[in-house]
Structure formats: structure tokens, C-alpha cells
Amino acid sequence: MEENRGKSRKQDKRKSRRMVFGILAVGAAVLLAAGAAGWLHRQVREDREAAARVADLQREAARSARTGPGGETGLASEVDEPTGSAEAEASGPENDAERNAIVINSETGSDRETQNDGSNGEPERILSFAGDIYLSDHVLNAYRNAGGIGGVLDEGLRNAIAASDLFLANEEFPFSDGGTQAQDKQFTFRLPTGDVHIMKEIGLSAVTLANNHILDYGEEGLSDTLKTLREAGIPFTGAGANLEEAKNLLILETGGKKIGVIAASRVYPEGGWAAGASHPGVFSAYDPSPVVKAIREARSRCDFLIVSVHWGLERHTEPEKYQRDNGHAYIDAGADLVVGSHPHVLQGIEFYQGKPIFYSMGNFIFGSSIPSTMLGQVVFSPDGSVSYRVIPASSSHGFTHREENAADFYGSLRALSPGVMIGDDGSVSPQ
């Protein structure tokens, strides 16, 4: 009898423990669900607020286009120039944007074969641009096995880049030999500072740093990156020691033409990655208003303005609604070209108000396999006209190469780009 009572008490204890554990498990699940719901609610609210701000900005741009500050018809000065007097803004030490603008001169050298359309003896100028670059182990192995950059880029792409006056891409990693690895992040990237010479060998004139990997090794990793790029003579924008540096207008000059570049990111893992007045980070595009303001301030200081944005969803070939809304707002504010990155795949091209938006350029130099990517080009002709074209490419085992048989590539890009004409020669224009 006593033995049975003992067994019964043990069974009761086990049941109690199971009940306690069950209650705890249910409580934890409820807390996790509440946290996820809260995070989702915040994201939806932020997206709605950002969409409302974009709508306000677009309405303001439309009003300004109809009526100038004095009631005259035409484009208002606040859209085409920074707020205030253009003369006052463009001169004087008090003009922070002008003082902080970085100007890089790039004159045609002996290694570039100049192309002439015969109009007035002046060569055309070519600006090339690409998507994300990460010098992964696959890329480094390809480089080392070939004994140089010929293992990373084929001759066709190297020649296209060498024939360009300027080449711009997104550097999606930090150069650092230290720093603290980001926690709870699936992928973290870092390259030794000694490998920066590979970026020079790729032929980059400048890089954008606004992305979700540049702080993978914290503020120290970012600081090391800025120092390494400066010492290597590679200008950058999109991230910095503070907000002023992160949003800085980069001006690349070639043939007397000033090409402005602004870079921002709408993808990063936590709020602390956004640059502030006194702390480092990326120029944030979650709220489009600061980016629009930067575009307006930059518009009068360059002949052609590029906005590079890290945005969208990975592996999605269709842009999100906010990408379209924000891209339109950037062009309304004065951008001539919007270049997107982050999804790892190509997204389509749109012409809005006659200006192109390349929603995602995909990976250019990255991992073991890139089924489809491209090199974009802006061609500035001596007669003042501007045209666009793309060069199809793909990559395997860290080696990115030009696609000579490009019919399938152009067909796929046309399907992603309704309203855009893409010729068999890679030319891109509105229909």
C-alpha cells in the first residue's frame, strides 16, 4: 500500500512538472508571437509613413513644376536648386554641402581608346556602373589561381571597363583586420585591408558603401574601411564617420562634366547602423525625405546626378511598391539616374519622366555563381545627348564573364522592363 502511494506521488510530481513546463512553453510562444507582431506592426507603420512622405514630396514637386515661387510657370527653384539663393548657396565658407563635396578628376588616359562620333572632334564619355561586389573566398581563389584580375573578370568586361572614363559599383563588405563581428546575423563579410589593391585592379573609380554589410564588424570595421579606401585613393560615399560624411555628395569629373553621386540604404539590420550627427553609419533611406533633400541640394552642383540605393527583397525580380514610389520621388527631386542593388538578382528598368531607374543590378562580383548580371553604361555624346546601354554577363566559381550570346539575356530583361526598349546591341531607351 505504502509503495503504491509512493508511486502515485511520483506520478503526480511528474504531471506537475509537465504542466509547469507546458505553461512556460505556452507563455514563451505568446511572448515571441507578441514580439513578432509588434515588429511587423512597426514595419508596416514605418512603410505607411514613408509612403505618405513620398506622396507629399511628389505632390510638392508637381505643384512646384506648375508654379514657381513668384507665380510664374516653370520648374521652381526649390526642386532644381537648394533652398535659398543659388548664388549664396554656391559660394562662401558657410556652404557645408559645397565645402564637403568630394571632387575627383578623371581625364582620358593613354590606356583608354577614345571614341568619337564625328560631331565636333570631342570624344564621347562613358560612365559604367555595376551592382554589388564582395570579394568572397570564391573570388579570391579565382584571383590567386589565375595570378591576377584575369581570374575575376574576363577580357571582354575588362576592356569595357578600361574603355570607360568612370566606373562605379557598390562595395558590400568592410576592409578591416579587426572589429567585432555582428551578432545574430546569418552572413557577415570582411576582407583584410591588404586586399584593397584588387578593387583598384577591377578598375573602380569610386564605390558606394550604403548597404547591410558595411558594418558587419562594427564601427571599428567601418572606420578601417574608410581609412583603407582613402589610402588606396578610392573615393566613396554612402557611409561615414557621421551623417555629414555618409550623405556627402561625391563628384566625379571627366571631360569638364561633373557627375554627382549620392548613396543611401533602405536595408540594414538595426537602427544603430544609420549614421547620426555624432556617430558612424550609413545614409538611411527608410525615410526618403533626407535623401530627397540631399538630391535637391546636389542638383545645382553637378551636370548629371546618380542616386545609388540599396533596397528591395533578396531573390525578388519584381521591385516592391516602395522602390517605385521612392525611385519616382528621387527623380522628381532632380536625380538623372537611379541605380538599385541588394536583391542579388536583376530587376527591371523603368523610364520615369524620361530618366532611367535600374531597380536592381544584381551581384557583379560576389560568390560562386551569378546566373545573370550586367554592366550598365551611360554614354555622354559631344552633342550633349545622353544614352544608355547594358552589357550582359554571368559568373561561376568567382569568375565574371561577358555573355557573347546575349539573346536570352535581353529577352529576360525585356520581360522585366515593360515600356522599355532593349535592343539586341544592349541599347536601353523608353518606348
Image: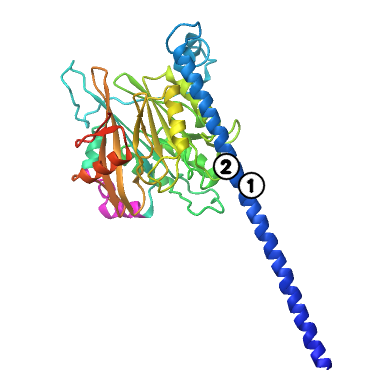
**On the picture, is 268 further left or further right than 380?**
right
Separation (CA) of disc 1 from disc 2? 9 Å
Contact? badges 1 and 2 (CB < 8 Å): no
Q: Which amino acid does label 2 sit on?
A: Gln
Q: Does the magenta stretch include residue 384?
A: no
Q: Where is residue 200 in the image (x, y as percent from the top left)?
A: 34, 39
- Name the residue carrying label 1: 38
Q: Position of residue 350 (x, y in %)?
A: 35, 32
The numbered mark, 1 or 2, whose residue comes first in the sequence reads: 1
Q: Is residue 146 magenta?
A: yes
**On the picture, is 292 further left or further right than 39?**
left
Per the image, label 1 sits on a secondary structure element best described as helix
Residue at the bottom extreme of this rendering: 1
- Which label was assigned to residue 51? none
Magenta highlight range: 138-155
- Name the residue carrying label 2: 43
Residue 67 seen: yes
**On the picture, is 343 further left or further right than 222?**
left
Exactly how many numbered labels are in the figure? 2
Front residue of 342/17: it is 17
Q: Position of residue 335 (x, y in %)?
A: 41, 25
Please say if 406 is above or below 262: below
Per the image, label 2 sits on a secondary structure element best described as helix
Q: Which amino acid does label 1 sit on?
A: Gly
Residue at image coords 52%, 47%: 217
Please say if 157 is above or below 184: above
